[in-house]
């Protein structure tokens, strides 16, 4: 199906769950709807077959059932049960006891102590360390690097890196596919990055308000249109400043389950600089790494990782890409996305990932009914308001 396009409110398909009277609304013309519109334009004099023709509605229904690639992007992996007989079940029980009663307490204690030590040390460095020759800044970045590595250790992370490690290259940005916040943690455990992040609450928000600000991360609120303008302006400022950390962007704009890749936002590809793709692929045999923020908090997500055997992943650092002659930002974004998908073995789909924050609008449903009714009325009256015999 063709990608979604923003239109005026008169053509609505999805409206925000937190409906805003001036929010942009989206219409997606499905194959079934297009079929109905074409049928209504034809001068077909056979009224009964046209009235009985439900092919458009049936085509949309069949497409939604057979190939619902949108919802598949945000579903957890369905792992088949293997502990189904008498000699495997005791082994599974032993594994559960080891993961929950041995590994989990050790991992939780380690990461709590690491967090406390990090906050105390970082606060002391930020408040009292001199910044001669950027000493304080370098020390803060080092602490963030070590703290990220501690999180990876708490999951028993087995991360294989392929290609040259990222460095601070003037005029370059890094982009990666996005499964969870742990993507950023894994990459920062190798080399500190500045990034763009949704503002969070709780202890994650505390980390954002301390460490993330110190390494020039950009925070925003999806609900605020002014924040989008601010992000674009700060992106350009960051790229132009050679003293800042390399900028890491997740252009999908939301977490996807590492089996699909939704459309990339064009903002990262419209800065006039080189783009360095990073492909991340997780082995879900050991842990479910997809974070669905509407179903679980980030704390619950970390608990599920710490009660798994390990987090196993491959990270590929691909060659820098430039916008080709005659190529626009959208074409550039699609080309980089395809490179990441090919390397990580994930499937690109033509969906805007932000649609998962929206629900079908009652006005859209009513509009669809009215359009079908109008086509039938025109068929019965011949378009002149007089009923056919």
Image: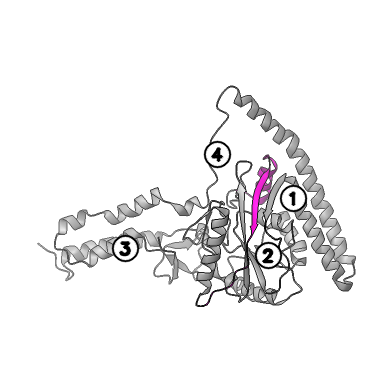
Return the residue at label 2: 195
Task: Report crowding for label 3: few under 14, some 14 to 19, many 20 or more residues within 10 A (C-alpha).
Answer: few
Q: Quadrant of residue 215?
A: bottom right
The spot of residue 212 in percent (x, y) is 74, 63
- Check the picture and name the quadrant holding the N terminus: bottom left
Give the alpha-carbon distance from disc 1 to disc 3, as whole Å: 50 Å
Magenta run includes residue 317: yes
Magenta run includes residue 66: no
Residue visible at 70% across and 57% down?
187
Return the residue at label 3: 34
| Highlighted magenta segment, given as a residue range | 296-325
Dot 1 or dot 3: first in sequence order is 3
Give the alpha-carbon distance from disc 2 to disc 3, as whole Å: 41 Å
Q: Which mark is residue 151?
A: 1
Q: Is residue 299 above or below residue 239?
A: above
Residue visible at 77% across and 73% down?
243
Q: Which mark is residue 79?
A: 4
Dot 2 or dot 1: first in sequence order is 1
Q: How is the image coloured?
A: one colour
Residue visible at 71% across and 70% down?
169
The residue tagged with tag 4: helix, strand or loop? loop
Dot 3 or dot 4: first in sequence order is 3
Give the number of the mark in front: 3 or 4.
4
Q: Is residue 108 above or below residue 1?
A: above
């Amino acid at each position: 199906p063709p990608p979604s396009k923003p239109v005026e409110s008169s053509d609505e398909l999805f409206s925000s769950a937190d409906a805003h009277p001036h929010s942009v609304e989206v219409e997606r013309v499905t194959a079934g709807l297009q079929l109905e519109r074409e049928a209504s334009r034809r001068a077909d004099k056979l009224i009964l077959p046209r009235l009985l023709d439900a092919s458009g509605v049936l085509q949309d229904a069949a497409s939604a059932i057979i190939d619902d690639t949108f919802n598949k992007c945000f579903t957890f992996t369905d792992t088949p049960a293997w502990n189904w007989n008498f000699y495997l079940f005791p082994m599974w029980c032993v594994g559960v006891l080891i993961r929950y009663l041995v590994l989990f307490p050790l991992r939780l204690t380690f990461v709590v102590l690491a967090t406390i030590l990090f906050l105390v040390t970082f606060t002391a460095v930020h408040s009292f360390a001199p910044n001669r020759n950027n000493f304080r800044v370098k020390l803060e970045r080092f602490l963030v690097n070590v703290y990220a590595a501690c999180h990876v250790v708490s999951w028993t992370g087995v991360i294989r890196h392929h290609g040259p490690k990222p460095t601070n290259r003037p005029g370059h940005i890094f982009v990666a596919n996005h499964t969870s916040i742990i993507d950023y943690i894994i990459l920062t455990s190798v080399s500190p990055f500045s990034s763009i992040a949704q503002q969070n609450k709780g202890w994650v928000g505390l980390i954002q308000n301390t460490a993330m600000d110190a390494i020039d991360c950009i925070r925003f609120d999806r609900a605020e249109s002014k924040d989008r303008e601010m992000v674009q302006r700060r992106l350009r400022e960051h790229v132009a400043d050679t003293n800042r950390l390399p900028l890491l962007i997740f252009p999908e704009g939301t977490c996807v389950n590492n089996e699909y890749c939704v459309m990339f936002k064009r903002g990262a590809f419209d800065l006039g600089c080189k783009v360095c793709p990073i492909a991340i692929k997780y082995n879900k045999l050991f842990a479910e790494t997809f974070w669905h923020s509407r179903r679980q908090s980030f704390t619950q997500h970390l608990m599920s990782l710490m009660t798994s055997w390990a987090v196993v992943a491959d990270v590929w650092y691909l060659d820098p890409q430039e916008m080709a002659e005659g190529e626009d930002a959208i074409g550039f974004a699609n080309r980089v996305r395809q490179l990441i998908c090919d390397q990580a073995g994930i499937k690109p789909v033509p969906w805007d990932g932000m649609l998962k924050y929206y629900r079908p609008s009652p006005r859209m449903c009513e509009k669809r009914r009215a359009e079908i009714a109008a086509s039938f009325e025109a068929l019965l009256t011949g378009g002149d308001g007089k009923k056919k015999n």
